[in-house]
Amino acid sequence: MAGHSKWANIQHRKGRQDAARSKLFSKLSKEITVAAKMGDPDPEKNPRLRLAVKEAKANSVPKDVIQRAIDKSQGGEGDGYEEIRYEGYGPGGVAIIVEAMTDNRNRTASNVRSTFGKHGGNLGETGSVGFMFERKGEIVYAADAADEETVLEAAMEAGAEDVESTADGHTIYCADTDLNDVSSALEARLGEAQSTKLVWKPLNTTELDYEGAQKLMRLIEVLEDDDDVQRVTANFEVSDEVMEQLAS
């Protein structure tokens, strides 16, 4: 499993996800509002909105919060938001992609650049690390959703490209343009997924020791705490031993 996924599990065990619940809801709501603004407010007629709603539900966002976010798009909110991608390097030479949604490009750029600088990173130009990742659809199921063979069979029949099954669960990858179709086919076979979203999948990873991982985690945490930042992806790998040290 990639380091970023392991770190998400550690955060959960430490209770950090609970502490950041309202911030997560806010980011997911913003994505829903912008998706509805850019297309039809009906999720069935708007693939991007359908994915945003599905991801919000997977993170236990209440139905009324989701509906309010859609309603905001029809009331003029979301007009000023633009999507920006920042790329750079973190401690240990780890490649990082930061996806932001902002109504003030200068503010966001300044904050992201400052965060990289303060935490041992270096913000680069657009495209400086993007070639190290592939844009993919990612669908995640719990380990008890089905056995490995059943998940693999369902994924291949649905048109997926790859499946990674571990004790933590099943991660299914597909072409970014196929995410809606593949996720719908899997849902019919395996039930609702834990997560369905577009991701930047690393083509290679950088191994980090405890000290390097600790510095990188701090950088990622501060970036993710920024209200303008929607998600952060990094191509690092750490051993189970290092993750246990980080969790202790």
Image (cartoon, rainbow, N blue to C red):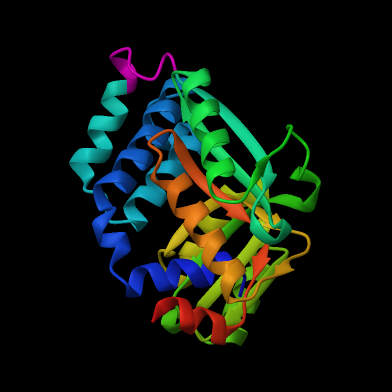
User: Percent from the top left, x then y, of residue 203?
Assistant: 78, 60
* Residue 177 seen in this snapshot: no
Q: Nearer the viewer, residue 3 or 223?
A: 223
Residue 146: percent from the left, percent from the top? Answer: 48, 83
**Residue 167 within the segment the image draws in magenta:** no
Q: Is residue 121 visible?
A: yes
Residue at image location 46% in from the left, 18% down from the top: 104
In the picture, residue 159 is in which quadrant? bottom right
Which image quarter holds the C terminus? bottom left
Q: Is residue 85 left or right of residue 27?
A: right
> Which one is in front, 25 or 179?
25
171, above or below 168, in the image: above
Q: Image point 47% across, 82% down: which residue?
A: 245
Tell me the magenta residue range. 73-80
Residue 100 in the image: state x and y as whole percent.
51, 34
Q: Quadrant of the N terminus?
A: bottom right
Query: Residue 164: which quarter of the image?
Result: bottom right
Q: Is residue 36 left or right of residue 161?
A: left
| Residue shown at 44% from the left, 54% from the top | 221
> Residue at left 81%, top 46%?
131
Q: Is residue 79 magenta?
A: yes
Residue at the far left in the pictured view: 64
